[in-house]
Image (tube, rainbow, N blue to C red):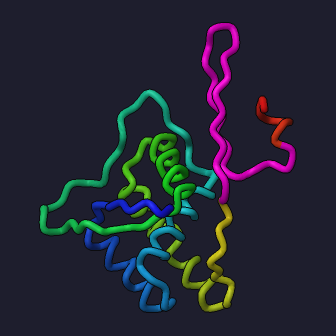
Amino acid sequence: MPIDTTLYVHESTLDSICEICALTGRTRNRIIVMLLRAALRDRSRAVRIGCSVRYQSRDRREKWRTVHVRLSEDEADYFKDLRNFYRMSDSLILAIAVRDYFDDILRQSRSGGMTDNYPFSNYILSREEIDGLVFWRICWGFPEKPEKYFLL
């Protein structure tokens, strides 16, 4: 079941997204999801703990736009985790993704390598209690042998 949500996006980020849409023929929703997925795959970003959530720099109110996005259930969970692990707002993650992956998406589109498959499917959340402590395991994907990683 799709999940409808909104992002509060700076107009400069939205202009870049619209440019990608015009150049690739893809919908804005699809491009936003592709950019967030690219951020999810980026292993170079450090997970942050013990700090507040970072937001984009302030700007005049009229420079911001509300954008409606439709996500699959898995995508919504992935992006919520992404926000929590990186300690950044969704709109900041999207703005960074536009900056970092704009050229990659255009290059993929021109080479015909831009696909609409879903590299992340399935989402496993497991809770274990050991010695009075609670451990959570989050898996983005589905391992070939889940019993190796999770108590079933």
Can you give x and y, in whole percent of width and height, for residue 94 in the image?
A: 42, 62
Q: 129 and 55: which one is in front? A: 129
In this rendering, would 52 be left or right of 32?
left
Is 144 one of the magenta-colored residues? yes
Q: Quadrant of residue 122?
A: bottom right
Q: Is residue 58 above or below residue 67?
A: above
In this rendering, would 30 be left or right of 110?
left
Q: Residue at x 51, y 48 (%)?
A: 82
Q: Residue at x 44, y 83 (%)?
A: 27
Can you give x and y, in whole percent of width and height, for residue 144 in the image?
A: 85, 50
Can you give x and y, in whole percent of width and height, for residue 34 in the image?
A: 54, 70
Q: Residue at x 13, y 68 (%)?
A: 62
Can you give x and y, in whole percent of width and height, for residue 117 in the image?
A: 66, 74
Region of the chain picked out in magenta, as a range: 121-145
Q: 33 and 46: which one is in front? A: 33
Prevailing secondary structure class for the magenta stretch in the rendered image: strand
